[in-house]
Amino acid sequence: MKLTRDGFSNIQQRVNLEETRKNWTALGESDAMWVVLTDPAKKGNRWAAADFFATGKIEVEEIFTQLQQAGALPLSGRALDFGCGLGRLTQALAARFESVDGIDISSSMIRQAVDFNKFPDRVKYHLNARENLQPFADGSYDFVCSMISLQHIPGRFQQNYIRDFLRVLKPGGVACFQTIHAHGWRTFIPEWSADLVRKWRSHGQPFIPLYGIPVERVNQIVRDAGGVLKNHENSDHLGWESRFMNDTFIVKKL
Ligand SMILES: C[S@@+](CC[C@H](N)C(=O)[O-])C[C@H]1O[C@@H](n2cnc3c(N)ncnc32)[C@H](O)[C@@H]1O
C-alpha cells in the first residue's frame, strides 16, 4: 500500500474513475445483464434479453407515476439516461421522449447497448469517462434519469454528476435520480477504507462497489445548482448491502 504525505484522505487505494472505467468495462464483457440486475437466478448469462428489457419498461412507468405524483409532469422532448448500461431504461424512455441520449463509462456496455438499440434514429449512446458531463450542453434536456448507477461511483464524483444533471437541464426540466446513503455502523466507515478492503478482497478481479452520499449533501448540491426538490423517497436498499438505504430524488430546475 502506498500512503501519500497528505494523510488518509489521499490514500492511493481509493478507487478512481479510471479504475471504475476498467471495472465496468470488464464487468460488461462477462455477464453484462447480470451485473446490471443481480438476480441470483440469472447469474451466468441466464437473463433472456426480452425479460431484461421488459423490467426497464416497468421501471420507467413507475418513474412516471412518481413524477406525476410529484407534480413534475408533463414531460416530452429530450431525455438523458446517465449510467445507461445496456440501455434497459434508455430504450423504455424512447416511448416517452422524442430523443434519448444514454451515457456510460463502460465501452463494453455501450457497444452492446448500440446492438440492442431498436430506435437508432432517436436513441444515441455515448461513452463518457470524464469526471463530469462536460461534452453535454447547458440547458439542453427536458429530463435526466439515473437509476442504480450513481451508487457505484465514488462519492466525490457523484457530486459532479448531480451538479451537471442540473446544468444540462432546461429551465423547468426535471431530473429523477437514485443514490444510496449508509446507516448505522456503516456511517463510520470512510470510503477509502471500504475501497481498500474491496481491492484486497477482489485480488485484481473486477468488482461492483457501492458508495453512499448523504441526503443533505444531495439537497445542497441541487439547491446550489438552481434546482428545487419536488420529492425524496427513502426505502430499503434491495441489493445485498443492507447497510445502505435507497434514495430517489425528483428535482426541477428553476
Ligand atoms: C448497475 S448498472 C445500471 C445500468 C442502467 N442504469 C440500468 O438501470 O439498467 C450501472 C452502470 O453505471 C455505469 N457507470 C459506472 N460509473 C459510471 C460513470 N462514472 N459514468 C457513467 N456511467 C457509469 C456502469 O458502467 C454501468 O453500466
Image: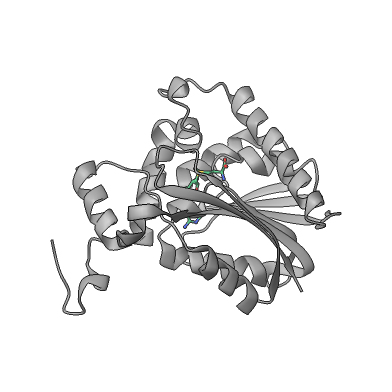
**Which percent across, then down, holds residue 95?**
79, 40
Colouring convention used in this rendered image of the protein: one colour
Q: In screen coordinates, is 94 left or right of 29?
A: right
At x 66% / y 49%, what residue is drawn? 124
Towards the viewer: 86 or 75: 75
**Which percent across, then down, holds residue 252?**
74, 66
The quadrant of the image that shows the N terminus is bottom left
At x 41% / y 46%, what residue is drawn? 24
The quadrant of the image that shows the C terminus is bottom right
**Residue located farthest toward the front when viewing the structure as drawn:** 184
| 87, above or below 2, in the image | above
Residue 106 appears in the figure: no
The answer to which quarter of the image holds residue 138 is bottom right
Residue 89 appears in the figure: yes
**Which percent across, then down, holds residue 142?**
77, 61
The answer to which quarter of the image holds residue 8 is bottom left
Towards the viewer: 17 or 9: 9
The answer to which quarter of the image holds residue 143 is bottom right
Q: In screen coordinates, is 30 left or right of 100?
A: left
| 160, above or below 82, in the image | below
| 221, above or below 28, in the image | below
At x 66% / y 37%, what residue is drawn? 117
| 252, above or below 114, in the image | below
At x 22% / y 68%, what residue is drawn? 11
Q: In screen coordinates, is 59 left or right of 27?
A: right
**Which percent across, then down, holds residue 74?**
86, 54
